[in-house]
Image: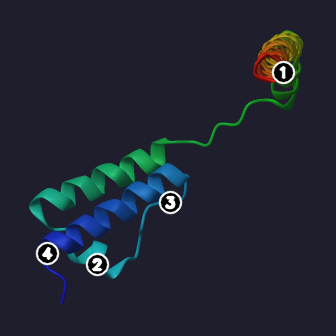
């Protein structure tokens, strides 16, 4: 059998979940009713019942949602262009660095080959 502390914790969590989801409080729950007279939890249960009665669901008007979506999309458009510009810059920077690396490697390769050929000519 669960301890009183564990049951209090479970009931409090269940109440919090019901309040945040916008559904009615846990009326008729056997464990809830058993603790309704508890000094601490009873007050919390009554308080949460009162809060649940006062809270009303709020939804924005469809026109507001549409306008907000349009504004957010318009505000995000310059960011997309900037990202594309940065991608092109990175591509060209990568291409230039790669070209420089290939040129340096080619120079070293030609230098090593010429040096080897020169060494064989002097030895021969």
Q: Earlier in the sequence, mark 4 or mark 3?
A: 4
Question: Would residue 63 be found to the left or right of residue 6 on screen?
Answer: right
Label 4 secondary element: helix
The residue lying toward the viewer, choosing from 36 and 61, is 61
Type of colouring: rainbow
Task: Give the CA separation, mark 4 to mark 3.
Answer: 24 Å
Q: Are marks 4 and 2 in contact (CB under 8 Å)?
A: no
Residue designated by label 4: 4
Q: Quadrant of residue 49?
A: bottom left
In this view, the mark in front (4 or 2): 4
Q: Are marks 4 and 3 in contact (CB under 8 Å)?
A: no
Residue designated by label 1: 117
The residue lying toward the viewer, choosing from 116 and 35, is 116
Residue designated by label 2: 31
Q: Is residue 38 above or below residue 118?
A: below
Question: Would residue 1 be found to the left or right of residue 87 on screen?
Answer: left
In this view, the mark in front (4 or 3): 4
**Residue 12 - label:** none
* Image spot of residue 39 (x, y percent): 10, 60
Question: Would residue 44 be found to the left or right of residue 3 on screen?
Answer: right
**Residue 24 - label:** 3
Q: Earlier in the sequence, mark 4 or mark 2?
A: 4
Structural crowding at the residue carrying mark 4, measured as other residues with C-alpha within 10 Å and reported as few (<14), some (14–19) or many (≥20): few
The quadrant the N terminus occupies is bottom left
In this view, the mark in front (3 or 1): 1
Task: Give the CA separation, mark 1 to mark 2.
Answer: 95 Å
Task: Give the CA separation, mark 3 to mark 1.
Answer: 91 Å
């Amino acid at each position: 059998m669960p301890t009183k502390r564990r049951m209090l914790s479970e009931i409090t969590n269940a109440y919090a979940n019901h309040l945040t989801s916008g559904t009615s409080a846990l009326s008729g729950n056997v464990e809830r009713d058993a603790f309704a007279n508890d000094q601490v939890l009873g007050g919390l249960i009554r308080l949460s019942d009162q809060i649940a009665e006062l809270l009303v669901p709020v939804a924005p008007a469809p026109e507001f949602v549409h306008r907000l979506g349009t504004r957010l999309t318009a505000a995000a458009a310059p960011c997309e262009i900037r990202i594309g510009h940065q991608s092109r810059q990175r591509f060209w920077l990568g291409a230039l660095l790669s070209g420089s690396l290939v040129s340096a490697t080619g120079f070293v390769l030609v230098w090593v080959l010429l040096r080897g050929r020169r060494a064989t000519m002097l030895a021969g």
